[in-house]
Image (cartoon, rainbow, N blue to C red):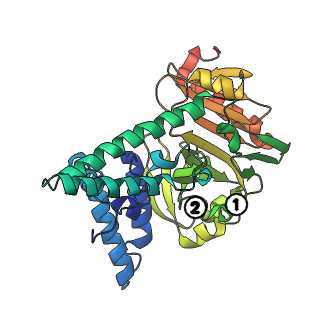
Amino acid sequence: MGKSNYYQVLGVHSDALTHEIKAAFRSIAMKYHPDRNPGSETAESKFKEAQAAYETLVDAEKRAAYDYMLSGETDVDRPSGRQVSNIDRSEKGLSTENRENAKDDSFGQMADSKSDDPGRGMRIRWIIGLVAMGVILALAMWVYSNPGGMRSQQFSDLPWQIEVGDRQRTRVLGIVLGETTMADLMGRLPVPDIRLFVDADGSRSVEAYYVNARIPPFEANLILRPDLDEAALDRIEAETTSERPMPSGARRYGLSDDALTSLGNVAIVEMSYIPRAHWTEDLITQRFGEPRERLRMDSDHSYWLYPEDGLAILVPRRGRVLMHYVTQERWGQTVERLRDEGRRRLGEDYGDHE
């Protein structure tokens, strides 16, 4: 195919959700928009390529047709999270992707020799791909459901492996809160979308949002918060480039290149981890143990608090969990922030714990 793979253009996986595709496009558009790169043919080309990819992948019918077209190619490298999310491919002499390509070639030759139907080989490859995907998903579920399983023990830096060094440092997911910087994560994680948020009450924070970050063997979205004092936040706010209101009443601001550069070497002190996999309450208890406290936020959400680890897990009745990690030094103010939010949501009825 002459054109670039649209999933690779946006830096997302083939099973990415619509909001993840939109976030990836916004990040690329901000970097390569012609208004920000006057006279640059390279930037203009990259922007147009990303725009074409976005317009195809956010439209359900266009995306389905595009995926079907990709499925018929024998030499396409699609970044599929399902292919690699829970398998240590280094154990095998031949990677999953190469094995499937080898199968594609052999079955394609068989189809060509036994039938004059030019679409038969493509249909066979499509069926093989679906079967392989089902096997891989079954293996992924096995990893999650077997806490003592051999495969799950081959990995370090799992979400429940938390090492509290002292009040200023905690290690989890290969990141040392209070020490690791966003510059340290370059090349390891996707390029983040970094914004300044100003809440309705005037409180401010800078957050770096990573879409489809892969920390083996799992994939998740990550939100990292650097350690910034009021003076640093004043400087960043003075250099914002755009403003957008949020449904919560907060306002979101884009940052200048100088502000983004200055954030590279600032230590990360808070992290939100939003896994793509489904976590049940039983699985959370199995991995993390019983929480010290269950803090009810509203009728559909509760925070499970693990103060010894500096961990608060948002557990919804439906949807994906959110695991929020902080240093011990910041635990008290984090819990107070959650209690204030609970009071706001529940009003006078707040105060009941599950």
Which residue is more in the foreground, 332 or 294? 294
Q: 6 above or below 147?
A: below
Could you say whether the residue bearing mark 1 is in a helix, strand or loop? loop
Q: 327 above or below 99?
A: above
The residue positioned 41% from the left and 79% from the top of the image is 37
Q: Mark 2 is on which residue type?
A: Glu
The residue that mark 2 highlights is 237
- Quadrant hosting residue 220: top right
On-image quarter of the N terminus: bottom left
Residue that protrudes farthest toward the left in the picture: 116
Res 248 visible: no
Badge 2 density bin: few <14, some 14–19, many ≥20, Cα 10 Å: many
Residue that protrudes farthest toward the bottom in the picture: 39
Could you say whether the residue bearing mark 2 is in a helix, strand or loop? helix
Which residue is more in the foreground, 325 or 215? 215
* Labelled disc at residue 181: 1
- The spot of residue 50 in percent (x, y) is 34, 65
Res 132 visible: yes
- The spot of residue 99 in percent (x, y) is 45, 54
- The spot of residue 330 in percent (x, y) is 76, 42
On-image quarter of the C terminus: top right
Q: Is residue 84 left or right of residue 129?
A: right
The residue positioned 38% from the left and 51% from the top of the image is 14
**N-term-proximal mark, 1 vs 2:** 1
